[in-house]
Image (tube, helix red, strand yellow):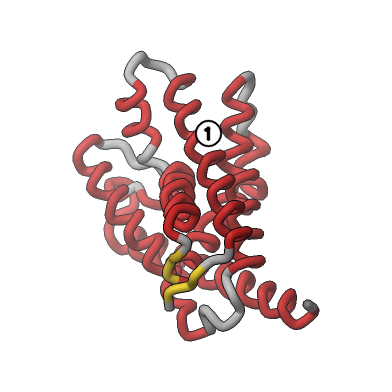
Amino acid sequence: MIVTHSSLSRRVAGTISIAAFIAIGAQTLINEGNNPLLNLALMLRYFTIWSNMAAALLLGWVALRGKLDARIAFALATALAMVGIVYHLLLSADHHPVGWDWYTNQMHHTVVPLATVFWWLAFSGVKATGWRTLPIVIAVPILYTGFALVVGEATGFYPYFFLDLPELGWGRLLLNVAGLGLVFMAFGALLMGARKLITARA
């Protein structure tokens, strides 16, 4: 279902899009090396940058065109919720960026994910997606896994231990991907439940 967004929704989406683009652009400049395009290519190996780039592009589209498929918006919000929660629960204790890296890190893992989730909760429309659309979120980890495996085969670099095919073998890797899909569905269900609760109280 294509949702037509209000002027307020478009302005908020545009603001998030600009913020995401600025954060990604800044990261390409402050990373080691003198080639921003090469830095961007290396950054795109990570799901965090994938999802932030998706937010920049898709919310920019909403700002310019005013329309977006509700299923895509739902998958985007779920992916960014995963980015924020997993980082702050599992990774942030061992990750201590400094200087400009601290600011871009906060944008990638906190500001853009939170803003996108709140935008979706506020403007997605309760009738736009129902429980039958929940499995759509599985497409996100499947697409990323395929990308990561192709890059890993070509470069020998696997960005996450649970996708390290040479170390795990196909059996364990497929189990990991299945588990990842279930986690995405659980996060998506929580988002849908939160939206229904908010709408019921409005």
Q: Position of residue 156 (x, y in %)?
A: 26, 36
Residue 36 shows in the view: yes
**Which residue is located at x 55 percent, y 70 percent?**
188
Q: Quadrant of the C terminus?
A: bottom right
Query: Which of the 4 image quadrants contains residue 118?
Result: bottom right
**Viewer-side residue, 4 vs 182:** 4
Q: Position of residue 60 (x, y in %)?
A: 46, 50
Q: Position of residue 162 (x, y in %)?
A: 42, 52
Q: Position of residue 45 (x, y in %)?
A: 36, 40
Crowding around mark 1 (Cα neighbors within 10 Å: few <14, some 14 to 19, many 20+) is many
Residue placed furthest toward the left: 154
Q: Secondary structure at mark 1?
A: helix
Q: Which residue is mark 1?
A: 23
Answer above or below: position of 97 versus 129: above
Identify the amino acid type marked 1: Ala
Q: Quick check: 178 left or right of 110?
A: left
**Viewer-side residue, 77 vs 9:** 9
Q: Quick check: 168 left or right of 28?
A: left
Q: Quadrant of the N terminus?
A: bottom left
